[in-house]
Image (cartoon, rainbow, N blue to C red):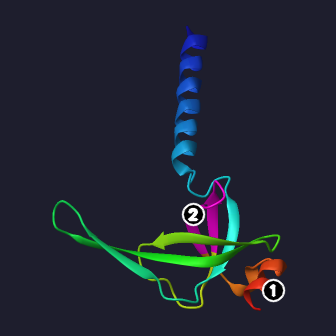
Amino acid sequence: MKKFLLSIIVFFIVLAAAGYAVLAIDWNRFNKEHYYVQINEKPSIEEFVDHKGAVYKSYWYTLPAYSEDGNMKELHFSAAKELREDAYLMLYVKNEDVVTSYDEVQREDLPSNVNASLND
């Protein structure tokens, strides 16, 4: 009986740990390619109204992005707010051209190939 009760407790501990791990992982960033851009142009703004009448804006950017190898690709992505002029972003990209998320990075944190390409 004690072994059965102990195995049930261990099972629930493992289940809780697995549930926490699944919720803690940011799936928009997990196992994605990294590309880097510099915000150096104004976005196009798209407004839309939800079913309650609230107005929302999306800020769309189309910019040259560079992989860690220095290869260039033009990427199209949106943000919920206008991004800071001259900011450097690391984009998380899946399926070659779908941007799932981004993080702002400092210029000194850019890979050397990217730094050279962005500052030409």
Q: Residue at x 59, y 31 (%)?
A: 14
Where's residue 37, x and y in %? Answer: 65, 79
Please provide the residue range marked out in magenta: 90-103
Give the residue number, with chain letter if any, for mark 2. 99
Q: Residue at x 62, y 69 (%)?
A: 91
In the picture, measured across the screen, residue 18 lies left or right of residue 119, that is left
Q: Nearer the viewer, residue 101 or 6?
A: 101
In the picture, measured across the screen, residue 117 lies left or right of residue 53, that is right
Where's residue 65, x and y in %? Answer: 67, 75
Q: How many marks?
A: 2
Q: Amino acid at mark 2?
A: Val
In the picture, measured across the screen, residue 72 lies left or right of residue 4, that is right
Give the residue number, with chain letter if any, for mark 1. 116
Where's residue 6, x and y in %? Answer: 58, 19
Residue found farthest to the top = 1
- Sequence-first tag of 1 and 2: 2
Q: Nearer the viewer, residue 80 or 108?
A: 80
Q: Amino acid at mark 1?
A: Ala
Question: Which picture quadrant has residue 120?
Answer: bottom right
Where's residue 56, x and y in %? Answer: 29, 72
Distance of label 1 from label 2 (alpha carbons): 23 Å
The 10 Å Cα crowd at callout 2, few under 14, some 14 to 19, many 20 or more, is: many
Would you place residue 8 above or below residue 28 in this image? above
Q: Quadrant of the N terminus?
A: top right
Magenta stretch prevailing secondary structure: strand
The 10 Å Cα crowd at callout 1, few under 14, some 14 to 19, many 20 or more, is: few
| Discs 1, 2 touching: Cβ within 8 Å | no
